[in-house]
Image (spheres, rainbow, N blue to C red):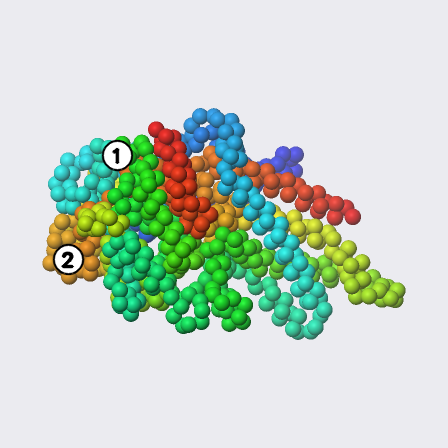
């Protein structure tokens, strides 16, 4: 085999990556530094002016705050719910465990667009089943305008996000739980440890690395999540549930300010790269240990 | 193995190189949106064109109306896209002005074709000295009133703002006596930013307002009358509670559901509302009346303008075959083709004089009203930035005021300042 053969074999994949990833990314970076209009074409070099425009836009700060909330609160609750269900499934209650395992995983396999529409109708203020239940139970006297009220819209998309992400967390936690050596629990029992004691001193420490990975993946995926928010609220009402990926579309394809949209997407890319590097570092540390 | 691979490669290349060259001219037609009946008709019309025009082959694609701007911007700026397409007439300013639409007044028989159409509708396809399309279908924004609810309450459709407000308030009720409101006077399309501004603008026009100055250089919708127009909706939502509380999240489907289930009494709609309602509740009766006017302008009730919207068929400036595209354009918009808008319920009004004056037109539901309203109606001002102003400026500011985040005056001032920036930037 010639020395160049491996490189030649790698070349098609490399060219493909450059074409579909590096080129658009560089073009996006260039767009963010120019005045770009789809109608008038790429204009003058304006340095960081597009970035300044993004930072000056009050909707950006609102979307940034919403994205942080959506990603952090959504991921944390997903992890808690996922851990809860994983603990239940790990109790090995026979055939019911398999059935429930399947049922709990359903939200994960449903397309976010389909899930978004389903949630939209579930939460409809006049015809939605959630309001119907709340009224039937006497918890409210009239339908709550979940998605039409600026104070509840973001909360609703977070709930939908939790519903979609917790099954992944559950599966990961379940795998983590099943990898914990039984001897540790037996030794703790011999020492007279209580159930909460076993949970806090054996289960949780053993799940630390899985939790770290899930936390980072949850943050990255939520930060990137466009579908659920767009389908449910389009970032409304009055930008109350606006998140950064939806705002990129807003800048680029509603306001048609491609330079500003590119600048924002580069900013999001930077944040995601930082999170990804953290994830890779965590993975390599886990493998080393 | 290598020999087999080579054989396959050669066979593939041979097949490609030997494929018969296509004779004649190929045209791409994009049809944006439309009710199922219209989509079928467009397909059939394209097939009929292919059958009757030797040497020209039309390939038709159906596209989403919701994606129209994204698709046009990305394709036309890249020099791709269709030869012929249907678009909003007010894109004549934005895309025609930027050189993306073909000026059809350069065709020698344009003057003859021009005479097919209602003159004021054809004018909406014009920007500067050029015409950029042939009218396809027109829309006048009106008020629809749920007949069952109005009749039950014994009230007539409103003509003035105070009647409108009173009717909405009266029709906002607790119908089952459980102490909560379950029927509202008015619903607004709040979840669609473009759609919301298209429902607010008719009220501005009926109040005698301009959106922009005549020379298109100044914003005018923030005058005291503009503030009063917004205040009307603020009061209806904040004081009377007669607008559905969840309107900010509503799209067309929610409005249709509410209207058909007698949960709302009024909505600002156009001719598309009949087919939309029929999908849910066939034959449901409603009154269609002009958008109410301010009380002091009641004497001008018949003549104050509403918002006119129109779809036109246009030719891309990138087309390599303008003459053939013009043939296709005319074929789609002949008076004979236009009669389909009269004989079928397609959600908009025909635009050719022959179709509008045909015997079938006389019995068409509400056509006389729409024609009357269209005669006085005005489109959005022909400024390239107007769609952006409507969707991204007017809507969010007005919605903030309606839900009580800011006052109507602050909203109009803020919207005007932002809109003026867009106008100044365009200059």
Q: Which residue is under mark 2?
A: B361
**Where residue B346 appears, x then y in whole percent?**
25, 57
SS at mark 1 in the image: loop
In front here: B215 or A11?
B215
Question: In this image, A50 relative to B31: left or right?
Answer: right
Looking at the image, which residue is at 49% across and 52% down? A150
Q: Is residue B42 visible?
A: no
Which circle marks residue A245 in the picture? Answer: none
In front here: A83 or B299?
B299
Frontmost of labels 1 and 2 is 1
Chain letter for mark 1, please.
Answer: B
> Are discs 1 and 2 less than 8 Å apart at CB?
no
Look at the picture and state if A25 lies above or below A87: above
**Where residue B144 appears, x then y in whole percent?**
28, 59
Question: In this image, A282 relative to B312: left or right?
Answer: right
Neighbor class of circle 2 (other Cα within 10 Å; few <14, some 14-19, many 20+) is: some
Look at the picture and state if A32 lies above or below A226: above
**Where residue A238 appears, x then y in whole percent?**
46, 48
Chain letter for mark 2, please.
Answer: B
Look at the picture and state if B10 lies above or below B344: above
Looking at the image, which residue is at 44% across and 30% down? A35
Look at the picture and state if B265 lies above or below B334: below
Q: Name the quadrant of the N terminus of chain A.
A: top right
Q: Is residue B162 visible?
A: yes
Which circle marks residue B214 in the picture? Answer: 1
């Amino acid at each position: 085999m010639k020395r160049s053969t491996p490189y030649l074999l790698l070349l098609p994949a490399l060219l493909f990556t450059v074409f579909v990833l590096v080129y658009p990314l560089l073009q996006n970076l260039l767009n963010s530094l120019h005045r770009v209009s789809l109608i008038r074409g790429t204009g003058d070099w304006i340095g960081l002016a597009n970035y300044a425009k993004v930072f000056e836009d009050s909707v950006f700060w609102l979307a940034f705050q919403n994205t942080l909330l959506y990603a952090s609160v959504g991921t944390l609750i997903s992890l808690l719910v996922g851990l809860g269900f994983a603990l239940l499934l790990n109790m090995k209650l026979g055939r019911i465990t398999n059935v429930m395992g399947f049922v709990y995983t359903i939200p994960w396999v449903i397309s976010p667009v389909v899930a978004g529409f389903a949630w939209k109708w579930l939460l409809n203020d006049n015809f939605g089943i959630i309001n119907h239940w709340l009224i039937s139970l006497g918890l409210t006297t009239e339908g709550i305008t979940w998605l039409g009220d600026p104070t509840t819209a973001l909360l609703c998309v977070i709930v939908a996000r939790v519903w979609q992400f917790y099954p992944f967390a559950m599966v990961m936690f379940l795998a983590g739980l099943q990898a914990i050596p039984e001897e540790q629990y037996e030794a703790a029992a011999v020492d007279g440890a209580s159930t909460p004691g076993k949970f806090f001193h054996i289960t949780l420490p053993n799940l630390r690395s899985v939790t770290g990975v899930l936390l980072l993946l949850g943050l990255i995926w939520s930060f990137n999540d466009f579908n659920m928010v767009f389908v449910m609220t389009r970032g409304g009402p009055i930008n109350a549930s606006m998140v950064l990926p939806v705002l990129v579309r807003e800048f680029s394809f509603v306001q048609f300010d491609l330079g500003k949209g590119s600048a924002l997407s580069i900013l999001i890319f930077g944040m995601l790269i930082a999170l990804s590097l953290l994830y890779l570092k965590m993975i390599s540390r886990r493998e080393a240990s | 193995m290598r020999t087999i691979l080579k054989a396959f490669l050669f066979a593939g290349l041979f097949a490609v190189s030997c494929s018969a060259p296509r004779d004649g001219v190929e045209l791409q037609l994009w049809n944006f949106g439309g009710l199922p009946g219209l989509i079928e008709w467009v397909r059939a019309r394209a097939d009929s064109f292919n059958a009757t025009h030797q040497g020209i082959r039309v390939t038709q694609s159906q596209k989403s109306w919701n994606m129209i701007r994204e698709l046009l911007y990305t394709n036309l700026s890249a020099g791709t896209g269709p030869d012929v397409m249907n678009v909003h007439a007010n894109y004549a300013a934005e895309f025609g002005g930027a050189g993306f639409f073909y000026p059809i007044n350069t065709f020698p028989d344009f003057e003859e074709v021009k005479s097919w159409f209602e003159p004021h509708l054809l004018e909406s396809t014009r920007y500067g000295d050029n015409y950029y399309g042939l009218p396809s279908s027109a829309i006048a924004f009106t008020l629809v009133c749920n007949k069952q609810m109005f009749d039950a309450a014994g009230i007539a459709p409103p003509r003035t703002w105070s009647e409108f407000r009173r009717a909405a308030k009266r029709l906002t009720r607790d119908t089952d006596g459980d102490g909560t409101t379950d029927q509202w006077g008015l619903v607004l399309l709040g979840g669609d930013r473009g759609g919301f501004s298209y429902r607010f603008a008719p009220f501005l026009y009926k109040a005698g307002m301009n959106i922009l100055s005549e020379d298109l250089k100044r914003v005018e919708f923030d005058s005291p009358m503009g503030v009063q127009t917004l205040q009307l909706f603020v009061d209806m939502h904040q004081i009377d509670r007669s607008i559905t509380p969840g309107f900010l999240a509503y799209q067309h489907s929610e409005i249709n559901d509410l209207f058909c289930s007698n949960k709302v009494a009024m909505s600002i709609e156009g001719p598309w509302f009949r087919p939309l309602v029929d999908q849910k509740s066939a034959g449901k009766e409603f009154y269609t009346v002009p958008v109410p006017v301010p009380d002091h302008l009641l004497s001008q009730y018949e003549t104050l303008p509403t918002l006119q919207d129109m779809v036109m068929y246009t030719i891309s400036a990138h087309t390599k075959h303008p003459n053939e595209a013009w043939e296709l354009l005319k074929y789609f918009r002949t008076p004979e083709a236009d009669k389909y808008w009269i004989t079928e319920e397609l959600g908009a009004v025909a635009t050719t004089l022959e179709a509008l004056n045909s015997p079938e037109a006389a019995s068409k539901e509400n056509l006389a009203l729409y024609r009357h309203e269209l005669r006085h109606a005005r489109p959005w001002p022909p400024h390239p930035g107007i769609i952006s102003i409507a969707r991204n400026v007017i809507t969010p500011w007005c919605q903030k005021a309606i839900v009580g985040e800011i006052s109507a005056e602050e909203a109009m001032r803020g919207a005007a300042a932002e809109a003026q920036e867009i106008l100044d930037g365009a200059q």
